[in-house]
Amino acid sequence: MFFEFRQYTIKAGRRAEWVRFMESEIIPFQISRGMVVVGSFVDEQDADTYYWIRRFKSEKERERLYRRVYESETWKNDFSPRIGEMLYREKIVVKRLVPTPRSVIE
C-alpha cells in the first residue's frame, strides 16, 4: 500500500473555486471510479496552495484506476479543460508515500 500526495499551485484568487470544484465534482467522480481519497487540504499560510492524498493497494491498482479516470471521456472533455483554467499544471508536485509501521493512516 502507498499514498499519493499531490500539491497544486492554484491561480491567484481561485482557491475557493478550486476547492468547490474538487469537492463537488472531481473527488466524487474519482471515488465513483474506485479511487480512495484520504484527504483534501488547503495551506493556512499560502492562499494559492492545495493538497490532496489518495491511497492505492499496489502499483497495478494505481495504473488501472488512472486509466478508469484519466482516459474517460468525462475527464478529457469536461474536467481537464476546466482544471487548466484554475491551476498551474506545470507546478504540480506528486509524491509517493509509504506508511511506516507506526502510521495511523491506512
Image (cartoon, helix red, strand yellow):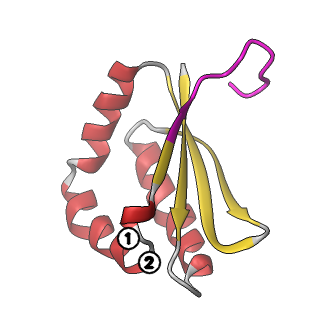
Q: Position of residue 44 (x, y in %)?
A: 79, 68
Considering the numbered disc 1 on the image, is that residue within a helix, a strand or a loop? helix
Mark 2 crowdedness (10 Å alpha carbons): few <14, some 14-19, many ≥20: some
In this view, which residue lies farthest toward the bottom?
13
Magenta span includes 18 = no
Q: In which quarter of the image is the C terminus?
A: top right
Q: In this view, does 38 lie above or below 86?
A: above
**Which corner quadrant of the image does residue 35 belong to?**
top left
Q: What element carries label 2?
A: helix
Toward the top, the furthest residue is: 101
Residue 28: x and y in percent read 49, 54
Towards the viewer: 48 or 70: 48
* Quadrant holding the N terminus: top right
- Which residue corresponds to the image point at 37% horizontal and 41% vertical from the top-left? 33
Residue 86 image label: 2
**Badge 1 is on which residue?**
83
Separation of marks 2 and 1 at Cα, in angstroms:
5 Å
Q: Residue at x 21, y 61 (%)?
A: 76
Q: Do the residues bearing badges 2 and 1 touch, measured as CB atoms within 8 Å? A: yes
Q: Where is residue 86 in the image (x, y as percent from the top left)?
A: 44, 77
Write the residue at 31% across / 39% down. Answer: 66
| Rendered view: 19 above or below 4 | below
Q: Going 44% across and 72% down the picture, which residue do you hit? A: 87
* Magenta highlight: main SS: loop
Q: Which amino acid does label 1 sit on?
A: Ile
Residue 97: say if magenta.
Answer: yes
Range of magenta residues = 95-106
User: Type of residue at label 2?
Assistant: Met
Q: Return the residue found at the far front.
A: 91
Left or right of 26, for residue 37: right
Question: Who is closer to the viewer here, 47 or 83?
Answer: 47
x and y, in percent, of residue 42 in the image: 69, 64
